[in-house]
Structures are given as C-alpha cells and as structure tokens.
Image: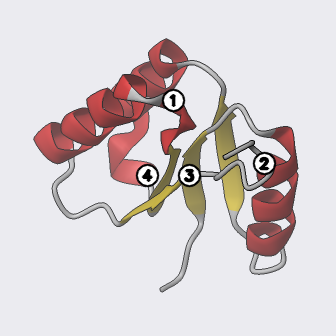
C-alpha cells in the first residue's frame, strides 16, 4: 500500500512521534489531531485524499464516533485501531 496521506487521532505524543517517523520514511504525510472535532472536520473535507486512518482508542467513545464517520463517508479507507495498555497498574 502506498500511503501518501494519513489521518491520526491520538493524545499520545510518543505514539504520534513514532508513527510519524515510520510513515515519513515512505514519503507519507500525517495529519495529526488531538480532538475529535478537528479530525472529523478534516475527514469531511479531505476524505478523498486520505490513504489511511489511525485511531488511538484511548479516546474512548470519540474513537467510535470517528470510526462511524469513516464508515459513512469513505467505506474503503483502511483503518488501523490502536490502544495503549497501562501495564504498570496495581492489581
């Protein structure tokens, strides 16, 4: 898959940096959003340009809202869903 433009919804700056470095090596540009409203606005306006959507499910219901919007307006857009796990929490 040739990714030219990806949408990323995350609050995790470490993940943002890691993904940015990985995709930029292949020449991709990443549109990074920290709020659902901004991601939705771009999705509506630039959905035909996007090659990939990456959603960090630490956003909870916001991630589901973005998934539903992608399904409604660009059914063929590949989606990568990620989430972090706090392995250091007390049992």
The Cα atoms of the two marked residues, 1 and 2, are separated by 14 Å
Residue on which the image places disc 4: 49
Q: Nearer the viewer, mark 4 or mark 3?
A: 3
Q: Residue at x 43, y 52 (%)?
A: 49
Residue 76 versus residue 87: which sits nearer the camera?
A: 87
Location of residue 24 by image quarter = bottom right
Helix, strand or loop for disc 3: loop
Helix, strand or loop for disc 4: helix
Tell me if residue 26 comes above or below residue 57 in the rendering.
below
Query: In x, y percent, where is residue 65?
Result: 28, 27
Residue on which the image places disc 2: 16
Q: Residue at x 44, y 54 (%)?
A: 50
Q: Earlier in the sequence, mark 1 or mark 3?
A: 1
Q: Is residue 78 left or right of residue 19?
A: left
Residue on which the image places disc 1: 59
The Cα atoms of the two marked residues, 4 and 2, are separated by 20 Å
Residue 2 versus residue 21: which sits nearer the camera?
A: 21
Residue on which the image places disc 3: 83
Residue 91 versus residue 70: which sits nearer the camera?
A: 91
Q: Residue at x 76, y 39 (%)?
A: 12
Q: Is residue 87 left or right of residue 21?
A: left
């Amino acid at each position: 898959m040739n990714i030219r433009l990806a949408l990323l919804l995350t609050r995790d700056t470490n993940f943002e940096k890691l993904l940015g470095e990985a995709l930029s090596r292949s020449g991709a540009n990443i549109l990074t959003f920290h709020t659902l409203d901004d991601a939705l606005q771009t999705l509506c306006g630039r959905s035909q340009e996007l090659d990939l959507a990456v959603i960090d499910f630490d956003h909870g219901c916001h991630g589901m809202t973005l998934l539903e919007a992608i399904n409604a307006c660009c059914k063929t857009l590949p989606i990568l869903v990620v989430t972090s796990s706090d392995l250091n929490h007390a049992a």
